[in-house]
Image (cartoon, rainbow, N blue to C red):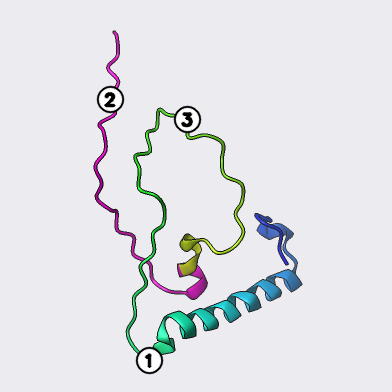
Amino acid sequence: MLEPRQSGSQVSEAQYQETSERISIFKDWFLKEYMGDGERSSILVLPISNVTPNYRDVYPGAPSPAATGLRTTYLSPYLGAPELAIPSMFSYILHIYVSAR
């Protein structure tokens, strides 16, 4: 099994084959269990993140540690499926600083 965030140049052929097989098993299972395995047209809608303003002049805090499991942003490449990102509409407080020049 690959270590999280392992560089591609450090991946052996055996590790690559094992990971490819695991992704194939996941893809077959997911399509059968969630998408009907071609029996009907399906669409899957997933939230990617909490929608909040992300100001560039505010420190975002320490980066999150690498998460285990499947992230929603990885689903499309694993399944070889198209992905459509639609921004949501939200209200936010206008964040303006006026220079004292």
| Quarter of the image where one finds residue 24 | bottom right
Alpha carbons under labels 2 and 3: distance apart:
16 Å
Determine which residue is flagged by label 2.
96
Nearest the eye: 79 or 43: 43
Magenta: main secondary structure: loop
Determine which residue is flagged by label 1.
39
Alpha carbons under labels 1 and 2: distance apart:
52 Å
Going by the numbered disc 3, the residue's amino acid type is Tyr
| As drawn, 58 above or below 23 | above
**Residues packed near mark 2 inside 10 Å, few (<14), some (14 to 19) or many (20 plus):** few
Q: Residue at x 48, y 68 (%)?
A: 75
Which is nearer the N-term, disc 2 or disc 3? 3
Secondary element under disc 3, as helix, strand or loop, is loop
Q: Residue at x 40, y 89 (%)?
A: 38
Determine which residue is flagged by label 3.
59
- Total tally of numbered discs in the picture: 3
| As drawn, 68 above or below 32 | above
